[in-house]
Image (cartoon, rainbow, N blue to C red):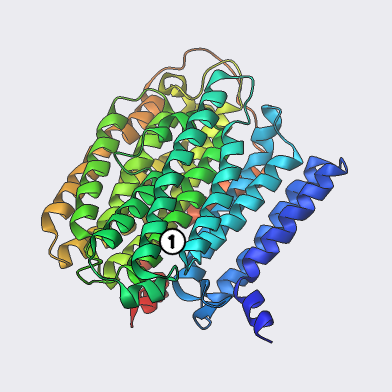
Amino acid sequence: MDYLHDLSAFLPGIIVTVAGLTALLLEAFKKGADQIYYLSIGGLLVALAVAINSLFGETGTAFTGMIVYGGVAAFGSVIILLGSLFCVIVSKDYLQDIDLHSGEVYAMILLSVVGMLGLAAANDLITFFLGLETMSICLYVMAGLIKNEKTGAEAALKYFLLGAFATGFLLYGIALIYGATGHTNLDEIAAVAEASPLFLAGSALLLVGIFFKIGAVPFHMWTPDVYQGTPTTLTAFMATAAKSATFIAFVLILTRMLPGTEAGDWTNVLQVVAILTMVVGNLIALAQDNVKRMLAYSSIAHAGYLLVGLAAGTAEGYAGVLYYLFAYTIMNVGAFTVIAYYERNKGLDFTQIESFAGLGFKFPLMGVLLTIFLFSLVGIPPFVGFVGKYYVFAAAVNAGLIPLAIIGVLASAASAYYYLRVMVYLYFKDAHKEYTLKTPGALFKYTLILLAVMTVYYGIEPVLPISGLMELISSYYTI
């Protein structure tokens, strides 16, 4: 009954696959988009419940070692499904207002999630590539959904062309690694890997492909244009679920294929890329007047903070990265969702920061929620963003990378300017004109409130008697 074991190991992915294919069939038979919307929510909820249950189960490999389950893969699946679920829930009202509320959008999201789940469980370079491309192809389509605007077409074309270029590096790297070791399975590669020029070149090209997908400098130029041109709730999906899936796969590659040997010591490379990513992301974000582009460059900076944890190369660093991905998903989905709410109102370009003048008093709830998410993104206690940054920077300090941690803290401090600038416009600038904001739907509003509650709760959770999230994550690295 090995096949039953294999199916149960990838059960969340199978559930989402069935939901995605069902969504495609319903769309083909011209069923209402609302039915597919609720189907998507239901499928993601069931998959999330299964993934949460697997957090406390056994770990191992399935499909003849092609995937891993439990532990890091299970926690990664929870992050991906949680971010995807929140993005789907808040998308309905926004997509209806921009005339994009159709079943095919939700089908693309679900099928992209299947690729992400495969990516987060990859124990073989072939599985890694299949998951990455399944995710990416769906994201290319989503980036070009706004066909009647130049920014939408530019976003899709730039994402596709640069994505295909990065895939070439990735595949060539896989080919060189296979040529050097005779294997594509991560564990088998680690067992025979030597610091040969062929293996090192293949690993370097593989890292280039990964750096592109996470938006690390100098492979980041697609990020602001794609984030700006994509529908905002789908931008949130790209910025959280897709980035989390790639980082989880990166963690698996570093811990299973590139262990701390002469052939796998990439600490210096990760340090350099982390510094460039943090500094460039924050510096360019300082000059942005478009809020979506500002959040795009800030997401580049957050990728740099995550790379700090990876550069530490310790169990503490990898655990910190997993926690930070959880924190980043919650606060970033929340921030993009509030931006999407404001964007629904016609008459002003609500992606420009000047349009936020006086909005804090127009609908106080949304102003407070955006403030919570932005404070968390800065890394101010008692919000979850502070805890996430503490874990990755502390891991770097304990690994002896004190200069890297100092640069990270300074870069994070600089980000306070452009995040707090939005709040200055919300509460300390006069509105350009009088207008009435739309009332958000109940599901939309309560989802945002839940995200805000999670942002605050997990910011104080480490000091509560019932805390345990970081302890759970750390248990995955006890070996």
**Outermost residue, bottom side:** 1
Seen at 65% across and 84% down, the residue is 2
Is 359 positioned to the left or the right of 31 in the image?
A: left
Is 234 positioned to the left or the right of 424 in the image?
A: right
Q: Compare residues 376 and 393 and report the one nearer the observer.
A: 393
Query: Residue 111: percent from the left, percent from the top?
Result: 65, 52
Query: Residue 278: percent from the left, percent from the top?
Result: 25, 43
Quadrant containing the N terminus is bottom right
Seen at 49% across and 66% down, the residue is 122
Q: Number of labelled discs?
A: 1
Secondary structure under badge 1? Answer: helix
* Residue type (three-letter) at the residue carrying disc 1: Ala
Seen at 58% across and 69% down, the residue is 51
For residue 179, say whether it is visible. Answer: yes
Which residue does the numbered mark 1 point to in the structure image?
Answer: 249
**Mark 1 nearby-residue class (10 Å; few <14, some 14–19, many ≥20):** many
Which quadrant holds residue 231? top right
